[in-house]
Amino acid sequence: MRDAKDVIDDAEELREREEADKEVQRIAYIEARIEEIKGLTDGLLGADVHILQARADKADNIVIEESYGEFEEAAKAMWTSSRQAISKAIGDRQKYDLEQTELETLRKDKEARDKKDREDQIATDAAEQATIDAEKKAQEEKDQIEADKQQAIKDKETAEQATKDAVAKAKKDADDAVKAEQDRVEQAEQVEKEAAAKREANQAHRKKINNAAASKLKDAGLSIDQAKEVVTMIAQGKIPHVTIAY
């Protein structure tokens, strides 16, 4: 049978174990709180500024007081270290965000300038091309007017010459008719002579007409030899559908 002293010893041992357990739990709780303060610095790199500010607010709501017991100074040191790390991360992130904003602004400004430069260049090129096209069209119209004018002059000269040639031919035909009538009444012995004279006159006439035609062809741009060759071929019937009116 246990005596009173054994009972007291057992009670004291139990109390000591309970106090030891409470101490272990107290220390674990404090260490967990300190670890929570330390955990505020996890994932700071690359975090959004709002997340970082939430961490800072959470840190600011933590009060290091005597409940930390012998770990109070360690907790304060951990809090200070964590809070500084958070503040630095906020500053770095704000600086980074500002730089990115400035870079984006510069990029957009450059894109706007480049777009304006392209549009200005397109407008300039279009204006220059429009000027070139207008000048070309004006020159073409001017050239056409001059060509029409020269053609009109040439047509007029051709018509005038044709009229002169027709008058000359009509006059000569009339003269030849009179001469023929006169020859008919001449003496019989003159018939052969008149016939010879007529042949000679006819040859002269053909030569004149041929020369006149060759002259016109020469005026049209042929050489004199080429003009004579063309007239000869017409006279010989070597050019279809073309004749010389003698």
Image: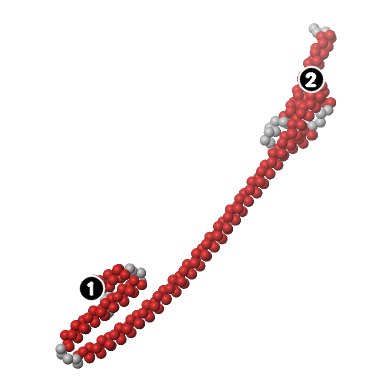
Q: Residue at x 31, y 76 (%)?
A: 212
Q: How is the image coloured?
A: secondary structure
**Quadrant of the drawing holding the N terminus:** top right
- Image location of residue 25, percent across then percent down: 77, 22
- Image location of residue 8, percent across then percent down: 83, 11
Quarter of the image for residue 152 reads bottom left
**Quadrant of the drawing holding the C terminus:** bottom left
Quarter of the image for residue 199 reads bottom left
- Residue projecting furthest to the left: 189
Residue that carries the numbered disc 2 in the rendered image: 23
Vertical order, 128 against 59 (above or below)? below
- Residue projecting furthest to the bottom: 185
**Which residue type does callout 1 highlight?**
Gln
Q: Nearer the viewer, mark 1 or mark 2?
A: 1
Residue that carries the numbered disc 1 in the rendered image: 236
Vertical order, 180 against 136 (above or below)? below
User: Disc 1 or 2, which lies upstream in sequence?
Assistant: 2
Mark 2 element type: helix
Mark 1 element type: loop
Q: Marks 1 and 2, Cα distance to the nearest angstrom?
A: 145 Å
Do we see residue 15 in this rendering? yes
Q: Residue at x 16, y 85 (%)?
A: 192
Q: Residues within 10 Å of mark 1 (few under 14, many from 20)?
A: few
Mark linked to residue 106: none
Q: Residue at x 52, y 65 (%)?
A: 134
Quarter of the image for residue 102 reads top right
Considering depth in this image, is 111 or 169 the residue closer to the camera? Answer: 169
Considering depth in this image, is 63 or 122 the residue closer to the camera? Answer: 122
Q: Residues within 10 Å of mark 2 (few under 14, many from 20)?
A: few
